[in-house]
Amino acid sequence: MSFDPIDFLERAVQTPSHEEVGKMRDLLVETLESADTGAEDAEISVEVDDAGNTIAVRDSGRVGPHVVLNTHIDTVPPHVPFERDDESGTIRGRGSCDAKGPLSAMLAAFLGTSPERGRVTLAVTPDEETDSTGAADLELTPDPDAVIVGEPTELDVCNAGKGRFQATVTVRGANAHAAEPESGVNAVRAVGDLLAALDSFDDREDRPDESDLLGDSTLVPTTIEGGTATNQVPAECSFVVDRRSIPPETAEGFRDALESHLRDHAPEGVGVEVTLAERETPFLAAFETPADSAVVRELRDASGGAIRPFGAATEASYFAEEAPTVVFGPGALADDEGAVAHAPREYVRIAEVESAADALEETLAALCD
């Protein structure tokens, strides 16, 4: 019996994976192991590695390219119940578009393709929404020649994406009685000047040039806290910044540049320290893949979608240094009414899942012919 991506998607959305992914991974492994591909060669091997990645391989046994399909099975909390709406042709619920819709399409393409040359690997990670420890530890052998990362792109082929760094800016002054403010150094007041200085951070001479694909970097303050008593000049205040980067900026390079910039704009007597968020894994960096790469051309021709950047940071950055990498899948991060992915109204269109499966299968066949 042939694989039905919509049947799998319905079961997947009804399998919560916002707190732990064990049941969702079991469903995925069971589906792969029980699949009847009807092919005498390129049989499927399936394993779950020590990092919790599910890795399935179809190897032709003949020399050729190694094409990787990658997406994730974890979702953000809270769980949103499954609902199928045949009138609108949608499946709703947490993970329907991010990223169980893309996973369903990739499964269909993987199971429907028997490569003439080389091999196809389906690599599904367990914690993309948090620390990406699965992707960081993923070992792909041989090195990939092309990688397609499943995320909601509305069937467009996304050949670039900004990175995401997070840092905390700690501002230090000196305590004093609020009745004698001139005897202290007010860290909260100083933060006002430093928040304003963020606007000029990307005006410095050594900033990365604007990317033709990605445009300019962004720097956004997101949270702030400071002070310990309502009648005391506060000695410390801190705020968190979200950096959406463009190549070739690195996390450490961003930290050093931001600390230097803010120290130059700090009031007298104010100390400034910038620290990157603690992670077990590398930050998700920006990536760019040339539009004339084979994987971009073939997937664009098969899907009919536009070639454009992706709007969010993804694990694509972990693969892009080694191989041409694109982001592709059914569903949208947002629509005309507002947020879709990570939102209570998350949904994916059934026709898009089916179209994505067809486009991926056609692309795999073209690359491995």
Image: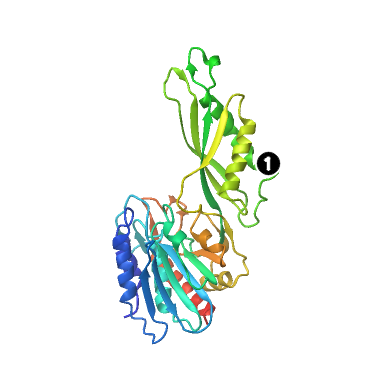
Task: Give the color scheme: rainbow, by chain, secondary structure or one colour.
Answer: rainbow
- Neighbourhood count class around disc 1 (C-alpha, 10 Å): few under 14, some 14–19, many 20 upward: few
Q: How many marks?
A: 1
Residue 330: quadrant of the picture: bottom left
Q: Which residue is mark 1?
A: 204
> Looking at the picture, which amino acid does disc 1 mark?
Arg
Residue 236 % position (x, y): 49, 27
Work out whether residue 101 can be spotted: yes
Callout 1: SS: loop
Residue drawn at point x = 55 percent, y = 46 percent: 243
From the image, which quarter does the N terminus lie in? bottom left
Task: Residue at the far right: name it.
Answer: 205
Residue 70 percent location from the top left of the image: 45, 66
Q: Where residue 22 sits: x, y (%)?
A: 30, 61
The answer to which of 323 and 192 lies nearer the viewer is 323
Relative to 156, residue 35 above or below: below
Q: Nearer the viewer, residue 61 or 240?
A: 61
Above-or-below relation of 154 to 218: below
Q: Position of residue 202 (x, y in %)?
A: 64, 42
Residue in view at x 58 percent, y 51 percent: 250
Q: Residue furthest top?
A: 179
Q: Is residue 158 in view?
A: no
